[in-house]
Image: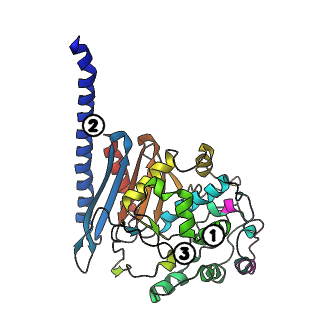
Amino acid sequence: MKKVFLLPFLLLISYSSAKAYQAEKLKHSLQELIDNAIEQDSTIPGILLHVEAPDLDLSYSISSGISDISTRAPLSENSTARIASNTKTYVAVSVLRLWEQGKLELDDPIIKHISEKHAQILKSDGYDLIKITVRHLLTHTSGLFDHAGSNTYIEKVFADPSYEWTRTEQVQGCVDWGDPLFEPGEQFSYSDTGYILLGEIIENVTGKPIGVAVHELIDFKKLDLSATWWEKVEQEPSTAPDRMHQYFREIDTYNFDPSLDLYGGGGLVANTKDMARFYQELFTGNVFEQPYTLDTMITKVSFPEGYTPSSDYRMGIFYFNFNEMDMYSHSGFWSTQATYIPELNASVSIIITQFAKGRLINKLLIETSELIMK
């Protein structure tokens, strides 16, 4: 009789041991993966990767390489970074939280929520702010020219990295450096300008600075995002690890003024652990009040017949299918990316400290997902 009672207990121990072995094997393989990537590309100072995989009881951060080329300081697995356009997912979630609360409608014309000053700037270039809605901004279907994609803007940023940009100057750049691209809803074209307007909408609806508003709407404290903050708007948390150096070729961008990408298209600083945790909590129902809100966020955008967008962008997030696995993901200018993989119930975040390493990030993501499946 004792053997009968002991059997389930022994099976549980055996299962737990196998799970622990699998997790340790995965950790070793992941470290080898990023170490090899560093060895094969001498232009990369460092790589960070985090896997959040609850089904494996795994929450694991790793690093390889250095944080600072000048001092050769090693890169800590907990280091934070400017996550650039990954911020857009947090902004979209915050807007959707305001929608849940009944404080705005997704089909509100944006003229209802932006300043008269910015409205006049945009109208001067022919934008119809009654036709452009909050939904269009969220899905990059507004037809707004992207100020951040302009060569003029990039040249200005690198000519004077310490310059403090305002949101108004960037909205003006949208008008001065380009023209309306298409009628709202007709096509897809990625636009940072649209997201800095969403940042303004969040501020105007809540009456709070964007960093404070996003922090509260998402509830960073509840999600334990202790290494995530809005640069220059919020005070850096005392618990946050040091920010790493991020490079544009040979240029160290560490001291570039954050205002170049601060107002909603970017602005957040985080580490890979917090990035992956946010995605995991978002896709497992711990951020929105109602399940239909996440469904709305990840619903495929419809376009006029005959038009196929260059990317499958939903609301603040891209959808991909790699190796027959669905993936919801966003990347950032400084080679940052976070991804949720429903089939694995796992989130993977990667930061490479060298600009323009998107292909390598995707390769590491695929190889990491394959290792998780083993």
Front position among marks 1 and 2 = 1
Residue at 40% across, 67% down: 335
In the rendered structure, find residue 149 and report the number of the disc placed on it: 3
Badge count = 3
For disc 1, the marked residue is 203
Q: Secondary structure at mark 1?
A: helix
Q: Secondary structure at mark 3?
A: helix
Front position among marks 1 and 3 = 1
For disc 2, the marked residue is 19
**Badge 3 density bin: few <14, some 14–19, many ≥20, Cα 10 Å:** some
- The residue closer to the viewer here, 203 or 128, is 203
Residue at 24% across, 67% down: 65
Residue 104, horizontal then vertical, whole percent: 71, 59
Q: CA distance from mark 1 to mark 3?
A: 24 Å
Range drawn in magenta: 120-136
Specify whether residue 281 is painted magenta.
no
Residue 314, horizontal then vertical, whole percent: 59, 54
Decide which of tag 1 and tag 3 comes sooner along the chain.
3
Q: Are marks 2 and 3 in contact (CB under 8 Å)?
A: no
Residue at 65% across, 64% down: 137
